[in-house]
Amino acid sequence: MAYNYRTIIEKAYQMANSMEDEGKLATYIPELANVDPSKFGVHMTKVNGDNFGMGDHLERFSIQSIAKVLSLTLAYKILGEEIWKRIDVEPSGTKFDSLLLLETNNGIPRNPFVNSGAIVICDILISHLDDAREEFLAFVRKLSDLPELNYSDKIADSEKMYGYRNVALCNFIKSFGNIENEPAVVLDFYFDMCSLEMNCQELSYTISFLANNGYKLSNNEVIVSSSQSKRINALMLTCGFYDESGEFAFKVGLPGKSGVGGGIVALYPNNYAIAVWSPKLNPHGNSFKGMKLLEEVTTHSEMSIF
Ligand code: GLN
């Protein structure tokens, strides 16, 4: 269907911006509490190369759990279907840092996007790569065409200082035998991975291979097979927003992933990837305004996967 995506984004941005923001900044990572809560940006990258952004779309922010899509992509490339022996593909219905289901599931995380699952992915990368920290960064630099991209020590150190729940998760999973490496090593990598910073333009471009059947936009390089791309999208749709994944599918209707830095990415296969950033989070840990904006975009463009 033909639609004017610029007009739709402008309208959605204005509508979401005029709402009272009921969200709250994430404060459990002290550095995230220092971000200006009024920031609001959006950028769409279409698979035909067109792109358009508004507001604070060129300002970098902490992508946090959005990086879990990229770490899953790299681990899935390396391990193939073997990976699902270590992590399940079911929605958790719990908060992102919950320990609850690990006990009954014998240390197998429900999916790769809750913290427990992303920690197991970090363990897998450490076991299979010579230097997971450097090789993951090189992978994201390649996906994003940003050769200067780096981890933020400031954010990683800030999270590490208070990351008690993640320490608990990693040790708990280790007790079931589903972590191979030393928990301290796995957690260091996990905190680094979550500390990457990008702006909405960079993020929508980085994730666009998942809207393009696994091919990188700029040179058609195969990042993952189309079947793997489809499966990562299925996981984003069912698990990308933790205990609010149903609500996101219901209201927005796209595969997506959020982070506690206030970023959200979403994509419409064969058409576009979009990234939005507004730091204040709803009680589920997802950007309040970001969710509203995306709901407006898919409602007015009448373009969701349903
Ligand atoms: N680094 C964050 C944490 O582990 C990521 C959580 C998120 O973005 N939902 O708590």
Image (spheres, rainbow, N blue to C red):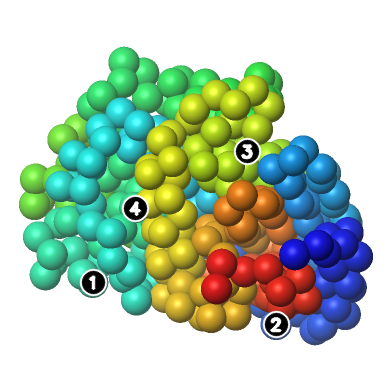
Residue at image coords 58%, 53%:
269
Q: Dot 2 surroundings within 10 Å: few (below 14), some, or many (20 or more)?
A: few
Closer to the chain start, of discs 4 and 2, is 2
159 vs 304, left or right, is left
- Per the image, the residue denoted by label 3 is 206
Q: Judge whether 39 appears above or below 43 on screen.
A: below
Q: Dot 3 surroundings within 10 Å: few (below 14), some, or many (20 or more)?
A: many
Q: Quadrant of residue 264?
A: bottom right
199 vs 285, left or right, is right
SS at mark 1? helix
Q: Residues under labels 2 and 1: Cα distance?
A: 28 Å
Q: Dot 1 surroundings within 10 Å: few (below 14), some, or many (20 or more)?
A: few
Q: Residues under labels 1 and 3: Cα distance?
A: 33 Å
Closer to the chain start, of discs 2 and 1, is 2
Asked if labels 1 and 2 touch by Cβ distance under 8 angstroms, the answer is no
**Residue 87, x across and y down, in percent:** 23, 52
- Per the image, the residue denoted by label 1 is 100
Residue at image coords 11%, 70%:
104
Q: Residues under labels 4 and 2: Cα distance?
A: 29 Å
Closer to the chain start, of discs 1 and 3, is 1
Closer to the chain start, of discs 4 and 3, is 4
The amino acid beneath tag 1 is Leu
- Per the image, the residue denoted by label 4 is 112
In front: label 4 or label 3: 3
Asked if labels 2 and 4 touch by Cβ distance under 8 angstroms, the answer is no
In front: label 3 or label 2: 3
Which quadrant of the rendered structure holds the C terminus? Answer: bottom right
- For the view shown, which residue lies furthest in the top direction? 130
The amino acid beneath tag 2 is Glu
In front: label 1 or label 4: 4
The amino acid beneath tag 3 is Thr
Disc marking residue 22: 2
